[in-house]
Image (cartoon, rainbow, N blue to C red):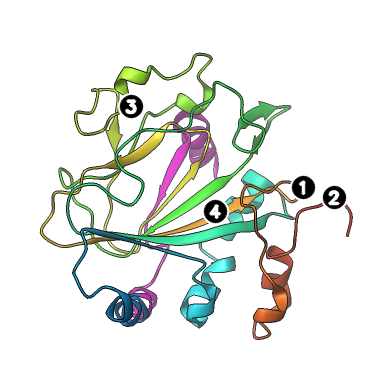
C-alpha cells in the first residue's frame, strides 16, 4: 500500500481497487456462474447466494492469492493471513440474500471483526474483498457503508440501519466490473436495494489474521490437490504455531 492508500483505508475503512480482475478473468468467472445458475434457478428468483466456491474450479481458486490484492492483505493482516470463507451474491432486483440492514461498526468491540491502529501499524480482524463481476453505477444500489465507522466509539443508531431509506451518512460505493472493494468488517456496511435492469454479481473472499477464524468450518486441503503451495498455506486452519 502506498501512503495515500494507507491514509484512505485508515480514514474510511475501505479502499476501491480498480482492475482487480482482468476482462478474461471476469468472463471466465461469469461463464462458470452461468452454468451453476442453470442447474438450480428454474424460477428466476430475485436473489441467490452460493457458498464455498473453490470446488467450481480454477477461476475461483486463482482468487485465493490474486496478485492484485495480496499486497494489501499482507499490509492489513500480516504475511500469514488466511482465507476464512467465500461466497457469491446475485441480486436481480430489490433486497439481496442478507437484506438491506446495516451491520458492523467499531463499537461494540468484536474480537473477530475489529480495527486497531498502534505503533504506526494497522491491525484488522476479518477483512473482505468484494469483487464486482458486473458494472455498478451510481444510483443502482449495491454496497453501502458509513465511512469512518470502523473507528466509532459509539454504537450505530438502530433507527438508521434500514437501507430502504438510507440516512445521508450512508455512502454508496460503485465501480465497473473487475473493481474490488476492500473493507474491514468493523466498518458499518450493508447492501442498498438493487434498482438496475441488469443483475448484480458480487464475489466475496473474506480473510482473517492467522490466529483467528470467523466461519465455523475450515477448508479441507485434500479436496484441492491442484492448488499451489502458497494457496494451500492461505487455506490453513487458524493457529499461531506451524
Residue that carries the numbered disc 2 in the rendered image = 240
Q: Quadrant of residue 232?
A: bottom right
Please, what secondary structure does the residue beneath circle 4 have?
strand
Asked if the residue at tag 3 contacts the one at tag 1, i.e. Cβ–Cβ closer than 8 Å, the answer is: no
Relative to 153, residue 2 above or below: below
**Distance from the alpha carbon under mark 1 to that under mark 4:** 15 Å
Is residue 17 on the magenta stretch?
Answer: yes
**Distance from the alpha carbon under mark 3 to that under mark 2:** 36 Å
* Of labels 3 and 4, the one closer to you: 3
Packing grade of label 4 (10 A; few <14, some 14-19, many >=20) is: many
| Residue 104 image point, x, y percent | 48, 32
**Distance from the alpha carbon under mark 2 to that under mark 1:** 5 Å
Along the polypeptide, which appears first: circle 2 or circle 4?
4
Please report the bounds of the magenta region as a residue range.
1-29
Q: Quadrant of residue 42?
A: bottom left
**Distance from the alpha carbon under mark 3 to that under mark 4:** 23 Å
Out of 28 and 179, give the one closest to the viewer.
Answer: 28
Q: Residue furthest right?
A: 241
Residue that carries the numbered disc 3 in the rendered image = 161
Instruction: Report the residue at 57% width, 58% height from top.
Output: 85
Residue that carries the numbered disc 1 in the rendered image = 211
Along the polypeptide, which appears first: circle 1 or circle 4?
4
Relative to 157, residue 34 above or below: below
Amino acid at each position: 500500500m502506498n501512503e495515500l492508500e494507507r491514509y484512505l483505508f485508515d480514514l474510511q475503512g475501505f479502499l476501491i481497487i480498480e482492475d482487480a480482475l482482468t476482462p478474461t478473468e471476469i468472463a471466465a468467472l461469469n461463464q462458470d456462474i452461468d452454468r451453476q445458475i442453470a442447474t438450480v434457478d428454474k424460477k428466476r428468483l430475485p436473489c441467490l447466494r452460493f457458498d464455498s466456491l473453490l470446488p467450481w474450479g480454477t477461476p475461483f481458486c486463482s482468487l485465493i492469492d490474486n496478485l492484485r490484492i495480496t499486497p494489501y492483505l499482507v499490509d492489513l493482516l500480516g504475511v500469514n493471513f488466511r482465507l476464512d470463507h467465500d461466497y457469491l451474491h446475485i441480486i436481480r432486483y430489490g433486497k439481496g440474500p442478507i437484506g438491506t440492514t446495516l451491520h458492523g461498526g467499531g463499537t461494540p468491540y468484536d474480537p473477530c471483526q475489529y480495527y486497531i491502529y498502534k505503533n504506526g501499524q494497522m491491525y484488522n480482524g476479518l477483512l473482505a474483498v468484494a469483487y464486482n463481476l458486473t458494472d455498478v453505477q451510481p444510483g443502482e444500489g449495491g454496497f453501502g457503508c458509513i465511512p469512518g465507522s470502523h473507528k466509532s466509539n459509539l454504537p450505530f443508531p438502530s433507527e438508521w440501519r434500514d437501507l430502504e431509506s438510507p440516512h445521508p451518512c450512508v455512502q454508496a460505493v460503485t465501480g465497473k466490473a473487475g473493481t474490488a472493494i476492500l473493507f474491514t468488517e468493523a466498518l458499518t456496511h450493508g447492501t442498498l436495494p438493487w434498482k438496475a435492469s441488469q443483475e448484480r454479481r458480487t464475489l466475496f473472499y473474506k480473510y482473517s489474521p492467522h490466529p483467528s477464524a470467523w466461519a465455523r468450518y475450515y477448508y479441507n486441503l485434500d479436496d484441492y490437490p491442484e492448488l499451489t503451495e502458497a494457496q494451500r498455506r492461505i487455506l490453513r486452519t487458524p493457529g499461531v504455531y506451524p
